[in-house]
Amino acid sequence: MSRERSPEERARGAVETAWRIEWPRLVAGLTRVAGDIDTAEELAQDALVAALEQWPRDGVPPNPGGWLMLTAKHRAIDRVRRDATYARKLALIGHELLIDQQQPAPDPVIEDDLLRMICTACHPVLPQPARVALTLRMVGGLTTAEIARAYLVPESTVAQRIVRAKRTIADKRIAYEVPRGPELSTRLGSVLEVIYLIFNEGYAATSGRDWLRAELCEDALRLARIVASLVPGEPEAHGMAALLELQASRTRARSDSARNLVLLADQDRSRWNQLYIRRGFAALGRAHALNRSRGLPPGRYALQAAIAAAHAMAPTAADTDWRRIAGLYALLAARFPSPVVELNRAVAVAMLHGPAAGLELADAVAATGALDDYHLLHAVRGDLLTRLGREPEARAAFTRAAALTANSAEQGLLLGRARSQHDRRTQPVQVQACRGSTPPPTAQKRET
Amino acid sequence: MRSMVLIRLDPARAPADGPDAALQEAMGQLIEEMTKAGVLLDTAGLHPIEEATRIRLSGGTQTVVDGPFTESKEIIGGYCLLQTRSAEEAVEWASRFLRVHGPEWEMEVEIRQLDDPA
């Protein structure tokens, strides 16, 4: 039987949810006026308390975000009256209030504030895990408990990471600003890298035992869309959004009913999400158009998205345009060389010119020793050796690969291949291109 | 998670000329806000029910019926597909969609979570 929510229930739920939705923008805006993130969070908390008092009585205001911001600023003034240490900030906040009264419409500065926040969260002075945690917390709006659950670490670890990151930002006097000029594209690179790490953490989990962590893919997708809207003129922001939408389109198809990993070539393509594919193509189109208008070649994420798009366009695995994909990997390898990209190129070349040509490239990568501990190097070699009928070598390669992966789903798949070398599948073990010469465990994987 | 927000209204009780300029602008702003927040995957309004076709399967036989369907009062006028972290967030965004409509509008939104992990 349906049940109408009581006004109290509804108001309380609306307060908490509107709070959650508005929190990143609210805190980003308040950080600019208050000068530090902790004070901003306290002021935002004050606004929540005020909303819990007033909304159940007066109803939810038409613009909850604006209401919360204005209330937080008023609370700041109240605090100043009680506490002399807030006095310095009064002038700033008072100025902001005047501006707000003249311009009650959506404040374009707010968008800049969120951009300031993500640029600060991804500042190079912070270690990578701190950037990830701070971005998920301050921009994604996740709680420390949610981040801890997704990363399988105690909540205190995440809380500590965030506290230390904020302290570093304060101690090093990191300016709360969006860098200008060439520094902006460097910082944007750091922002996009963090988003990609978050996505890959979730993507690696989608076929493992920890299904819940797959929510990280959605978090990364939302972050990528937010960043693309914050810097709509930056082709790589759209390239990243395109890459993630296209990869997310395969989520349903990349594990079977027992949650075993299903490789790209074996996936039921009717299960690919066409809406994500369309959105991915649209974002890729924006990235290409921006690059063309500036006379720039496609960046690393636009190139990877183009590769994902080539897969998305193939109605069956046999229809895959390997010539195009090998060409895109060659471009990627030339502009952003890394052993992982080279390994991917080997896979594409094997599909185009046969396993011997692919193995030659894969062996060249192996000879550098850079990917010795990287399971996919051995998985790719195992696959190519199988196709060349060199079964003892293939078995050894698959066994090595299985020993090197921590993901149970991948391990099962690799051990299966080590055992059944008579199963001559001609499917590629595809790795995903990524930056960096030494692959961090989360930054790349077999393309599935 | 993803949620389908189905927008239902009775055309006989809706303003005859549809949304006015102010409402159109407010809806445009909301859609922009939802897009920028990364939650809006897709949205569209639907053509009038008079142009619809229904196919009914009963006892193994299909019956094709063209509109208008006089027996239905509240009909689906449009939809939004949202991606949010919680069901409550989808409810709040849907509620914001209703909030931009004035008191002359009588309508309902139904928020249904997609039965799909992706």
Image: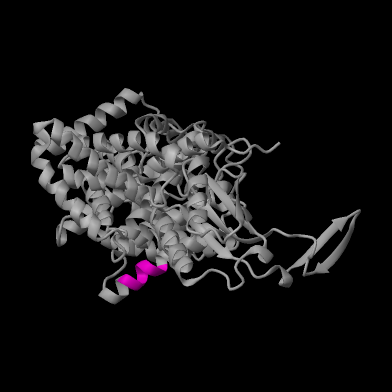
- Please say if A333 is above or below A81: below
Q: Nearer the viewer, residue B87 or A448?
A: B87
Percent of width and height locating residue B4: 58, 51
- Residue range highlighted in magenta: A285-290
| Left/right of residue A269 with respect to residue A13 in the rendered view | right
Which residue is located at x 28 percent, y 43 percent?
Answer: A71
Percent of width and height locating residue A228: 34, 59
- Please say if A126 is above or below A243: above
Q: Is residue A420 visible?
A: yes
Q: Quadrant of residue A83?
A: top left
Percent of width and height locating residue A262: 56, 44
The quadrant of the rendering that contains the N terminus of chain A is top right
Q: Is residue A397 visible?
A: no
| Left/right of residue A382 with respect to residue A171 in the rendered view | right
Q: Quadrant of residue A20?
A: top left
| Left/right of residue A209 with respect to residue A191 in the rendered view | right
Q: Nearer the viewer, residue A308 or A181?
A: A181
